[in-house]
Image (cartoon, rainbow, N blue to C red):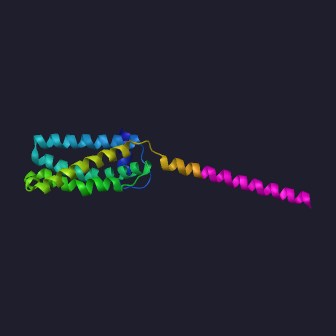
């Protein structure tokens, strides 16, 4: 576990490349446990806990996005799945959860809030499915296409050599 966590913090701003499932999920577990510790400290000492929560959130945000980006690339998808789920729909739902009176003010607004909440959870489940898939899809197809290209090139070269040999025999 510690090896993956160190690796993710060492490559905290590397958004290109691939991340394996263990790399992603061990780092996710570490950040989840770190958030839990910060919440526990906050429940005992609100001022110290608030500082710790902000420090943890700011310190783990970029590495979390980076490893999520690499994990999604490993499954052949883009980081935009996570960006759309978290940054576009999440704040709208957060406003509704923080100020429930706003969501209950009018019936259409309440239905909009409920629809966005359902969309958020559907996208979140889809994102978790993408992150849990076996990786290497793109690299396997690339490896396969390179192998096919090499076979085709060698077959063409062999064909040209045979044609040359046949032309020499005909002379």
* Whether residue 33 is situated above or below residue 76 in the rendered picture: above
Left/right of residue 3 with respect to residue 34 in the rendered view: right
Q: Is residue 93 left or right of residue 82?
A: left
Look at the image and say whether residue 97 sits in the magenta stretch.
no
Decide: is 35 above or below 77.
above
Q: Is residue 62 visible?
A: no
- Give the residue drawn at x 18%, y 50%: 114
Q: Which residues are magenta?
A: 146-171
Outermost residue toward the bottom in this view: 171
How many numbered callouts? 0
**Does residue 25 lie above or below 55 as drawn?**
above
> Which quadrant does the N terminus fall into?
top left
Q: Nearer the viewer, residue 5 or 23?
A: 23
Residue 42 place in picture, x, y as percent: 13, 44
Image coordinates for residue 122, horizontal then vertical, percent = 28, 47
Residue 14: percent from the left, percent from the top?
A: 39, 55
Describe residue 74's horizontal placement relative to residue 121 as left or right: right
Give yes or no for residue 153 being in the magenta stretch: yes
- Looking at the image, which is closer to me, 110 or 1? 110
Q: Quadrant of the C terminus?
A: bottom right
> Can residue 50 be seen from the camera position used here?
yes
Outermost top residue? 1
Determine the residue located farthest toward the right in the rendered image: 171
* 11 vs 117, nearest the viewer: 117
Residue at 39 percent across and 46 percent down: it is 7
Q: Main secondary structure of the magenta part?
A: helix
Q: Which quarter of the figure has residue 169?
A: bottom right
- In the image, residue 71 lies at what x, y percent? 39, 48
Q: Which quadrant holds residue 170?
A: bottom right
């Amino acid at each position: 576990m510690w090896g993956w966590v160190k690796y993710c913090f060492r490559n905290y701003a590397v958004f290109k490349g691939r991340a394996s499932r263990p790399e992603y999920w061990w780092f996710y577990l570490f950040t989840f446990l770190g958030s839990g510790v910060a919440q526990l400290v906050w429940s005992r000492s609100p001022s110290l806990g608030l500082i710790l929560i902000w420090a943890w959130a700011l310190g783990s945000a970029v590495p979390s996005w980076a490893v999520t980006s690499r994990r999604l690339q490993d499954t052949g998808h883009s980081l935009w799945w996570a960006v759309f789920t978290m940054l576009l729909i999440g704040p709208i739902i957060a406003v509704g959860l923080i100020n429930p009176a706003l969501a209950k003010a009018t019936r259409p607004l309440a239905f909009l809030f409920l629809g966005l909440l359902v969309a958020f959870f559907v996208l979140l489940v889809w994102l978790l499915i993408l992150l849990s898939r076996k990786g290497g899809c793109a690299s396997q197809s690339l490896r396969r296409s390179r192998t096919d290209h090499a076979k085709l090139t060698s077959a063409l070269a062999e064909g040209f050599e045979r044609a040359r040999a046949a032309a020499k025999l005909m002379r």
